[in-house]
Structures are given as C-alpha cells and as structure tokens.
C-alpha cells in the first residue's frame, strides 16, 4: 500500500496522491468484502485525507480521478465515481449506475450512493 504521511501530502505530486487513493480504495474494498471494519476504517481515513488534498488543489486535480473510473478494481471505481459526483456528476453517476447492476457488496454500495445523492443527502468529506 502507498500511504503518504499527512505532513507530506501537500507536497506530493498528483500521481502519488492517486496511487495512495487507489491503493486505499482497493484495500477498503477488500476489507469490506471480508467484514474487517478496523482495516476498512483505516483505509477510509486515508481515502478521505487524500481526496481532501486532491480537492484542495482545484478542479483540474479532481478531474485526475477520471483515470480511476475505469480501474480494474471495482472498489476503486466505486470510490472515484462517488467523489466524482461532487465535481462531475454525469461521469460519476454513469459509473455508479454500471456498478449498481452488479450483485457484489460494491454494487449494493453504488446503489445506496446513488440513492443518497439523488435525495441530496450525500456529503463529501
């Protein structure tokens, strides 16, 4: 896993942030599948911290998440698509709708994410 220490995050290149984000999203997805909430919560914290840094760099940095919308790992696509709803709702929703057709836990999460977003109750970290 590629975790960037918080104090180094502001100076990290966007490519390193994306690696950390994707690694944490994949690990979070695996933990979710196993029901390991401790690991899942740690990975969630990394995802949130990394996304906050990406967002702080502006729209162009946020758009760098588009490269993860077709990632081979379903959990990475899920997290990137959910965050994309904030700055590129059409792109994010398209990926979530595809994931929502699946029967995995990630498909279920995609369905719930879309429902909450459509209700206006989805909050971004």
Image: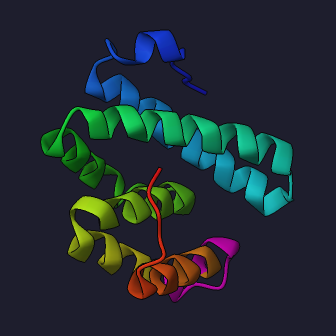
Quarter assignment of residue 5: top right
Q: Which residues are magenta?
A: 100-107
For the point 56% across and 23% down, the residue is: 3
Q: Residue at x 50, y 34 (%)?
A: 49
Q: Which quadrant of the rendered structure holds the N terminus?
A: top right
Residue 93 appears at what percent x and percent y? 33, 78
Q: Residue at (84%, 57%) from the top-left corner?
A: 34
Q: Is residue 18 visible?
A: no
Q: Position of residue 2 (x, y in %)?
A: 54, 24
Residue 28 lies, in percent from the top left, at: 66, 49
Magenta span contains residue 42 = no
Q: Is residue 119 left or right of residue 88?
A: right
Residue 16 lies, with reference to residue 84, above or below; the image says: above
Label total for image: 0
Could you tell whether 116 is left or right of 67 in the image?
Answer: right
Q: Is residue 39 above or below residue 68?
A: above
Position above or below: 61 against 11: below
Name the residue located 42 percent from the left edge and 64 percent from the top edge.
82
């Amino acid at each position: 896993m590629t975790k960037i220490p918080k104090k180094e995050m502001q100076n990290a290149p966007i490519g390193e942030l994306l690696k950390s984000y994707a690694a944490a999203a994949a690990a979070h997805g695996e933990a979710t599948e196993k029901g390991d909430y401790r690991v899942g919560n740690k990975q969630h914290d990394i995802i949130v911290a990394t996304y906050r840094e990406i967002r702080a760099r502006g729209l162009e940095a946020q758009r760098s998440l588009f490269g993860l919308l077709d990632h081979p790992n379903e959990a990475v696509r899920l997290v990137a698509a959910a965050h994309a709803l904030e700055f590129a709702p059409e792109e994010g929703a398209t990926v979530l709708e595809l994931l929502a057709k699946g029967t995995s836990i990630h498909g279920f999460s995609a369905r719930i994410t879309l429902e909450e977003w459509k209700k206006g109750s989805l909050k971004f970290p």
